[in-house]
Image: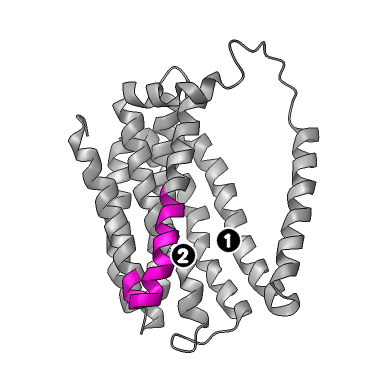
Amino acid sequence: RARHVAAVIAGLFTGVVAARVLGGLAGQAFGWRAVFVGAAVLTAVLGLATAYILPVERRQRRGPLFAGLVAIPGVVRRSPDLWRACVRQAGMYGAWSALWTSLALLLTEDEGYGMTTAAAGLFGLFGLAASVVAPLAGGLVDRFGAAKVVRSAYVLAALSVPLFWLGGQAMAALCAAAVLVHAALVASHVANQTLALTTTSAPATANTAYVVAGFAGGALASALAGPAFGHWGWGGVCAVAGAWLVLGWTATAVRPGR
């Protein structure tokens, strides 16, 4: 089951990497507005293609339309494993988001590396590590369990933070950190989403809670990373990422279980 989740996540992050690279190249050539217009067109085309290709499901809806949303707090409260997956992925995704969204500032500013937008976009190729790690993580989850994979992912992410800090002056450290943090994020994502889909009798509702928690953690960390970069530079961004990892892990220690 985890390998199936991993296949979807590998596709997801391959798209993320491609968007980063192509967006940087298009932005350099045509400006950022063209990138947004292109993204809008692609989204519309993919939406129509998805509606056409996916099989039709005719299910009889039970209860109010938004009953699943209303049920989210109760589902999370009754499942310690789901709650833990939500919090830990919020911490992991927040750390990744703080670093990855702010990285363009370090790469393009004159005080940093002074790269062009296109060159900074090509840095996203390091994210290909995610596409390689996802299938491996799926097999490891099926064999050793999600908890061990998440712990290992947090160790990798913790190692990446000081490397990112060193990367403010050393490009080699920045490249190594980019590979580590993507590997950590994807391994954690595969493990935690497998938990979200398998630990309750309402997998769709549980998955909704999981995805909302992850993106909320990422959005909040990104919102903090911008001011941190403005006040304290790249070191401030690394501090935000490190704090998010600490919060994501230690906050789950107050609930029973591994």
Q: Residue drawn at (79%, 41%), measured in percent from left and top?
A: 49
Count every numbered label the image shows and give the total: 2
> In the rendered image, which quarter contains the C terminus?
top left
Q: Where does residue 85 sit, x and y in percent of width and height?
A: 35, 37
Foreground of the two, 235 or 169 = 235
Foreground of the two, 223 or 118 = 223
Q: Is residue 143 left or right of residue 104?
A: left
Q: Secondary structure at mark 1?
A: helix
Q: Residue drawn at (50%, 41%), measured in percent from left and top?
A: 6
Magenta stretch, residue numbers = 217-236
Foreground of the two, 96 or 130 = 96
Q: Amino acid at mark 1?
A: Val
Which secondary structure type mostly characterizes the magenta part of the structure? helix
Q: Where does residue 249 sit, x and y in percent of width and height?
A: 25, 46
Q: Can you tell which mark lies on residue 100?
A: 2
Which residue was labeled with disc 1?
17
Q: Where does residue 19 sit, x and y in percent of width and height?
A: 64, 61
